[in-house]
Amino acid sequence: MKIVTLDIETSPNLAYVWGMFKQNIGLNQLVETGEVMCFSAKWYGQAPTSFYSTYHHGKEAMVEAAHEILDEADAVIHYNGKRFDIPHLNREFLAEGLTPPSPFAHVDLLNVAKKQFRFTSNKLDHVAQQLGLGAKTSHTGFQLWVDCMAGNAEAWELMKTYNEQDVVLTEKVYDALLPWIPSHPNYRLYHGGVDDLCPNCGSKDLRKEGKAYTSVSVFQRFRCEDCGKWSRGNQRLDGSAISPARHQG
């Protein structure tokens, strides 16, 4: 299974406004709509982190690169990407005349953090620091975006570092949360439905530990020695098989 971690950065909308507070901006006040200005991506388990931007590669090449990566991926790890990153990219694909990339599974770590835990804040930076995994790259705030839109080379270097660090940090959080992800794409389905693999990480280092009971059947229960995920076998202990492979949430 090919898994990629992805993060985008967008430019702000530009508009004419009459004041500083509580502005209701009409479409006729809009000067320029925001766009995806850059993205970073990293294939899981591989060292290089890719970075593409409108500044370094041009808009068309950047959008096509994002499309190619998503088209190749079986699953995409992101942080609020289902509501933010992917819809923004879909808009750019449509504007460039591209058809949808091949379907992929979402692993949205923001949803996992909200559903499985109670952090004081569910922001990536806070969750990562609480888990001792590092922090987001410090920057100059909104001024960084202003400077990048002005074509400032130093600002773009900082944006590149910031965007790439977000991807590295997201992957670290993914590793930490992996056994807690209830709807992770099932590795077993990519290997013929066998039950000797951890459904979440694909490891073969499983330990039999107890039984999993449903209202009508009993299954062998496993614990992954690598990521810690609990799962159950595909074979009922009375000898009848189930299909497709399933795992406990």
Image (tube, rainbow, N blue to C red):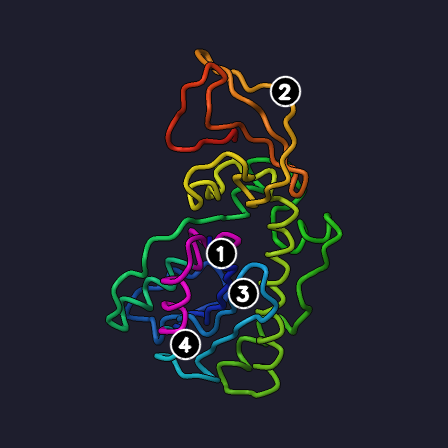
Magenta stretch in the rendered image: 64-85
Q: Is residue 70 above or below residue 154?
A: above
Residue type, label 4 = Met
Residue 83 on the magenta span:
yes
Residue 203: percent from the left, percent from the top?
59, 44
Residue type, label 1 = Ile
Mark 3 and mark 4: Cα distance apart in space: 15 Å
Q: Which residue is at a point 57% across and 88% down the rendered structure image? A: 153
Mark 2 and mark 1: Cα distance apart in space: 31 Å
| Secondary-structure class at tag 1 | strand
Q: Which mark is residue 62?
A: 4
Residue annotated with mark 1: 3
Residue annotated with mark 2: 210
Q: Earlier in the sequence, mark 4 or mark 1?
A: 1
Residue 68: percent from the left, percent from the top?
37, 68
Q: Earlier in the sequence, mark 1 or mark 3?
A: 1
Q: Which residue is at a point 46% across and 58% down the rendered structure image? A: 22
